[in-house]
Structure formats: structure tokens, C-alpha cells
Amino acid sequence: GYKTEAGDFFLDWYFASLKTHGGAVLAEARAVFGDAQHLAGKVAGVHWFYDDPSHAAEATAGYYNVNGRDAYSEIAAVLAAHGAHLDFTCMEMMNTDVPEQCL
């Protein structure tokens, strides 16, 4: 499970891979465009099973948002390190917009 040492290791590795890749793409884009272009990263607001302790949908997407981690802040920090803006989706969603069984 996600609370075990193996679960923590896997989720940390998976999320670190996502952030490393995103940082590399942003670094290449900055090298090509310099400051002539604004850079942004589109970050999906994964709302399915958000209220479930496992945050299963976020974990599947690579977001490590359990065990005391804040995936969205960590992704925002990667973007900020490269001077990129954050384009966050699903801000219009409300908890009542999804079936109750999806929490």
C-alpha cells in the first residue's frame, strides 16, 4: 500500500521522475526561447477520489499527494524554478460535480 516503505519509495520515485522530466523540458524551452516567450505548465486538478486518503487518481497520474506531501506545491516549485507560469485546470469543479462514490 501507499503507506508502506515500498509504497513511499515508489510514489516518491514516480513523482520525482515527473518533476525531473518537467524541469528538463522547461530548461530546454527556456534555452530555445530565452525570455522572449512566457512559459507555462498546464497542471491538471485531479479531483477524483481527492477526499479518499489514498488520493488514488492523483497517485496514478504521478502526483504524490499523500503521506504528508503536497504535490501541487511541489509542481508549482518546479515551474517557478524555471520562471514558468502555472495553468491549473478544473478550478470550476465543485465537490458536488462528481458522483459521491468517487469522493
Image (cartoon, helix red, strand yellow):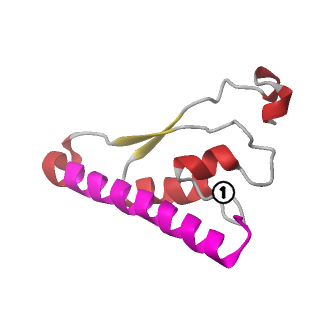
Query: For the point 69% across and 64% down, which residue is it?
Result: 2
Element at label 1: loop
Amino acid identity at mark 1: Asn
Query: For the point 80% across and 54% down, which residue is it?
Result: 53
Q: Residue 56 in the image: state x and y as whole percent.
A: 68, 48
In depth, the one of 25 and 33 nearer the eye is: 25
Q: Residue 90 in the image: state x and y as whole percent.
A: 61, 29
Q: Quadrant of the C terminus?
A: top right
Magenta-highlighted stretch: main secondary structure? helix
Q: Is residue 13 above or below residue 61?
A: below
Q: Quadrant of the N terminus?
A: bottom right
18 left or right of 9 in image: left
- Segment tinted magenta in the rendering: 1-30
68 left or right of 39 in image: right
Point out the residue furthest to the right here: 100
Q: Residue 50 in the image: state x and y as whole percent.
A: 74, 43
Query: For the point 71% across and 50% down, which residue is it?
Result: 55
Residue placed under numbered mark 1 in the picture: 65
Q: Is residue 72 magenta?
A: no
Q: Is residue 2 magenta?
A: yes
64 left or right of 95 in image: left
61 left or right of 65 in image: left
